[in-house]
Amino acid sequence: MTTLAARPDERTQPPVRPPKGGAKDRWVRRAPLLPALIFALIVTQIPFLYTLYLSTLSWNALRPGDRPFVGLDNYVTVLTDTRLRSALLNTVLLTAGAVVFSMILGLALALLLDRKFIGRSIVRTLLITPFLVMPIAAALLWKHAIFNPTYGLVNGIFGGSTDWVSSYPKGAVIATLVWQWTPFMMLILLAGLQSQSNDVIEAARVDGANAWQVFRRMTLPHLRQYLELGALLGSIYLVNTFDAIFSITQGGPGTATTNLPYEIYLTTFRKFEYGEASAAGVIVVILTIIAATFALRVISSLFKMEDHR
Amino acid sequence: MRARLSPPAAENRMKNRHWNNTIWGTVAWIAGLVFVFPVIWMVLTSFKQEQDAASNPPAWTFAPTLAQYGQVFDRNITPFLLNSLMASVFSTLLVVLLATPAAYALSLRPVAKWTDTLFFFISTKMMPAVAALLPIYLLVKHLGMLDNIWTMVVLYTSMNLPLAVWMMRSFLLEVPREVLEAGEVDGASLITSIRKIIMPIVSPGLAATALICFIFAWNEFFLAVNLTATNAGTSPIFLVGFISSEGLFLARLCAAATIVSLPVLIAGWVAQNKLVRGLSMGAVK
């Protein structure tokens, strides 16, 4: 099994040298970093501090007059409101649904593309195309051209007159997201498959392992970290899904597809409850930090692996 | 084991493998065509008359027309496209200018706390935009910068910065350290080693980074729909008018969707070999 450790095309990278030297050297090293760091600090951290401040005010933009300080009242309102909880649940369901299905399809497609066949690069180009279509264009395309009850493709090809979007709102949104995100998962998993050593698999085949055994015992364990990375990055992007909800269902019917981004958007720009929207925003950030701490651990382990190769 | 396998058996196995590849290759082709089909349908529909587009069962044969494209341009899609172009190109330039030196300071000549800094950058990417929307909206409004394309340039720059820093770092790490050190010993200045050693190795990666930042900026919708209107509306905003299903408009929608998706389709096809690396922040090569 030692052959797994090194492949000929992997160049070993010496570990990054720890900086040494005096104050001048430290500043010379820091100088190229500072513009980007300062820019990121200003543009991303100031709004967040402002959100914290806003979340303690009772402020409805439609109501003229003062904006009294109310402490944690907005948090109590938001946390006891069932809308936020149902939005949270919808976010989890939509994200998990889209990630799981695109992962399964992506794995199947990556396994297909890992073989040699005529026109492989063309098929790869075809398969990544859905990911490149502008998300709101994709959402509108699925809503009108595919799901529409009278002239949509689904009913046009298979018959029937189901109104897919109102009968299966979550399914319709997830289907659109899965179509767009499967290529992403496929690319990550394909990179994983192609980093697998051919010699070892060949040796296992010669030793009489069948295709399923090779997949189950060798390919899947090797792919594990790529599956984790795909799930992680997919979740980071998909948790923020807004385009598809905004254009396909507008969060409906009722609140069936209202996720957190859409709910906060409604609170801000439809109800103008600035204080409550900010409190909800802070809660989302806290939830994200919890999820991200876990996520960073995964990235960090990958990152170490990359450095140690 | 290999030695004990008789030649005919090995030949058989090869033949089987060949057959297998043909079968699975066909399956892959079918899957590829199924996946791309909605896009093909979008382009086909964009060349239809509205009556053909809304027919049931779907019309497979029709007299192609450019009428819908004409309609879309009559409805003034051009300013939206130009706004998108400005926001994407300028934010991409700014991102590259900020991220490349930063990535250098986090890879080849690292600052003391380079890991912490890298994770700070990625944590800003994980922050949901929705949590920052209201303060950004209020600050931008206070500055009188609502519906202004430069606001979008700044926001898209900060949106893409972590991705570009991570991606550029992964490309810079491919510069062989020995060559850099040899250059230093020979007395090459920083400028010379950037020009002669680093750039030739990193420039394909730089191009891919730029293309991926361009893609994300071009497709961005959430900030654009909340912060722009008639002056600075970007191309996704042009599509908002197609959300309601009233009236005959499917062919026109498809024409507009094709136009706005085209730049990204081209950028993505060009960058496809580096796409996975960009999307995974340089973690997967």
Image (cartoon, rainbow, N blue to C red):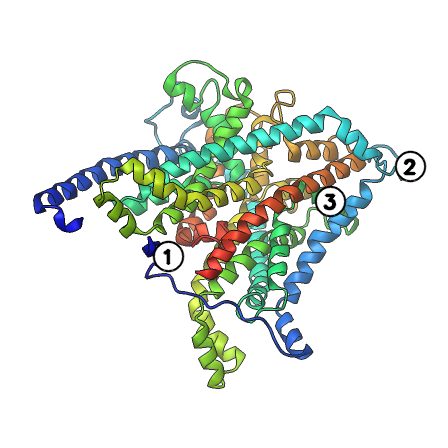
CA distance for labels 1 and 2: 68 Å
Q: Label for residue B137?
A: 3
Q: Please name the residue shown 49% across and 82% down the image.
A: B184
Amino acid type, residue under disc 1 in the picture: Ala
Q: Position of residue B176 (x, y in %)?
A: 43, 71
Residue A194 is left or right of residue B160, and the answer is: left
Question: Mark 1 vs mark 2: same chain?
Answer: yes
Q: Label for residue B197?
A: none
Q: Position of residue B34 (x, y in %)?
A: 35, 32
Residue identifier under label 2:
A65
Q: In the picture shown, does residue A229 fall above or below A170?
A: below
Q: Secondary structure at mark 3?
A: helix
Q: Residues within 10 Å of mark 1 (few under 14, many from 20)?
A: few
Chain of the residue under the numbered disc 3 shown in the image: B
CA distance for labels 3 and 1: 51 Å
Amino acid type, residue under disc 3 in the picture: Tyr
Chain of the residue under the numbered disc 2 shown in the image: A
Residue identifier under label 1:
A5
Question: Mark 3 vs mark 2: same chain?
Answer: no
